[in-house]
Image: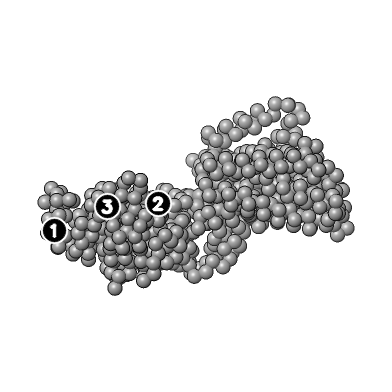
Amino acid sequence: MRTLILIALSILLLPLVVRPAIATEIWIFAIFGLGLNLLLGYTGMLSFGQSTFFGSAAYVAGWLLKHYGMNVLAALGVGVGVGALSALLVGYLCVQRSGLYFIMLTFALNQLFYFIAYQWTSVTGGEDGMPGIPRPVLLGLNFQDPLTYYAFVVVLFLASLWLMKRIVESPLGKILQAIRENEVRAEAVGYNVPRFKLLAFVLAGAFSGLAGVLYAMLFGIVPLEAIGFVFSGNVVFATLIGGSGSLYGPIIGSFVFIWLSESVSTIWARWPLLLGVAFVVVVLFLRGGVVEAWSRLMLWRFSKQKT
Amino acid sequence: MAILETENLTKAFGALTAVNGVSLEIEAGTLHSIIGPNGAGKTTLFNLLTGTFPPTSGRIVFDQKEITGTPAHRIAHLGLARSYQRTTVFPAFSLLDNVWVAAFATGRSWNGLLFKNARKYGEVTERAQTALSDVGLLSKADVPAREISHGEQRQLELAIALAAAPRVLLLDEPAAGLSPDETRKMVALVRALKGRYTIVLIEHKIDIIMSVSDRISVMHFGSLIAEGTPQEIQKNPDVRRAYLGGVAA
């Protein structure tokens, strides 16, 4: 309940504190993080190639929006589909391996998609990106107005959060965590581990796809970076800093990451340094990220009150 | 009637033949022990039976059906469950969740896999609780597995196998690393399970083997060298030479 109030408050206050575009980007990035965390936090798979699905969805849906004036909801549906489908393809190849090989495969396939986008200039615009993506009117809602679009993204974020909550609390969520905890035993008690990993991959890909289309519509362009490895790394960093052990970790991570990159970067060009320090602190002392720091603080205050 | 049979089962890892032409018949309802010195191939035999890896040659027949080469996750659904020599649980999970995932795997249906709240599977939770109470851990159902003692983890190990509602239980040294006191508890537990399940037991502690087994098979360097009742095995000169040696006296 307190988490819900906190989320509601931040949804309302955020556009007052930062530019609407940044506020919107935070929630989009949070959807992206929710998807990754199903892999990273729940299944224990570090995918270093999530931008493959984010970018592919952004390009395909962006193309349809730009050239065929597609309906917004249909474009989002296409994005979710492209995200899931590309994740099925990439995931099928990656889940055959585990550990370092898995990570390298996700990375290598990400590079493959990146260079396709880089070379295929007639469609993707290559290095210049794919500009001119509209935000068509939906049911009389004018998405050209930043706050209207912000509200639309927030609604989709809440739907994503609700859906992800259902997934992690379902038997599937338990099975994925069992795979994280002990792959051999999960297999022995009767789960086809590669199949379940693939399912997690496809679900994560669908969330990435949704985020990708919203991102393209927000900035009116699909930049080449949207399918690059830096983007894949960013969502991993954000999720780890927020806390991969919790459903809400990626949301906090998205706040910290986007806020740092958009606000602090204008004041101080060396801002990634801060990110590096935060990352080192998390890896060395706070494996549960901001979420763990908070719960430790609460525990500490609680024990002080008692004595 | 034999519920589990192997015919000339062989597994070679390169030049090493870990299991060599083993033909075994496990009668339904019995407790059949497999003994042998370290490295005799007992655990490899279990890995073959449960599909961890396929045999190099030979056949495995479970309940009249050939299961040679069936992958591990399918074996569990056929009714063959195992426990591990080295504790293999889900550390961050509560004890109940540890057995819950095993109970769900072999449950009646996977309806609602993606969307229904895991707490709403009453029948699965009941079976999980029964498995925990069978090993005497129900009172700790909410404790994370990593926080219980080694002895309790061995019991949990067993509960995970039980939760799958198997017909045949393969127990790989359930008393490994236990204190004399904990060992007595574990033996009592295995005794209580005897009759309810067909049990194949790997164990090193000879006194346990002699007191609980209906039949014993002896492995040495990957091959079966003897099979019989505990009395017959005790008298067998080959077994004495290969395995019991000075220890049995």
Point out residue B99 in the picture as x, y percentages from the top left corner.
Answer: 44, 59
Q: Secondary structure at mark 3?
A: loop
Q: Which residue is mark 2?
A: B88
Measure the alpha-carbon separation of dots 1 and 2: 35 Å
Image point 18% across, 51% down: which residue? Answer: B243
Task: Determine which residue is flagged by label 3.
Answer: B222
Mark 1: secondary structure = loop
First-in-chain label (1 vs 2): 2
Which type of secondary structure does the marked residue at label 2 adopt?
loop
Nearer the camera: disc 3 or disc 1: 3
Q: Residue at horizontal 83%, vertical 52%?
A: A65
**Label 2 neighbour load within 10 Å: few <14, some 14-19, many 20+:** some
Q: For marks 2 and 3, give the one nearer the viewer.
A: 3
Q: CA distance from mark 3 to mark 1?
A: 18 Å
Q: Are marks 2 and 3 on the same chain?
A: yes
For disc 3, the chain is: B
Instruction: Tell me if mark 1 has few (under 14), some (14-19) or many (20+) residues whose alpha carbon lies within 10 angstroms of its own.
Output: some
> Residue B236, which numbered label?
1
Q: Tell me if A180 is positioned left or right of B21 in this view.
A: right
* A51 versus B120 height, above or below: above
Q: Earlier in the sequence, mark 3 or mark 1?
A: 3
* Disc 3 and disc 1 on one polypeptide chain: yes
* Residue B57 rendering spot, x and y as whole percentages: 35, 57
Note whether B180 is above or below B119 in the view shown: above
User: Mark 1 or mark 2, which is nearer to you?
Assistant: 1
Q: Please say if the residues under marks 2 and 3 sit with CB atoms less than 8 Å apart.
A: no
Query: Of the residues under marks 2 and 3, which one precedes in the sequence?
Result: 2
Amino acid identity at mark 1: Asn
Please give the name of the residue rendered at 53% of the width and 35% of the height, measured from the top-left corner. Answer: A285
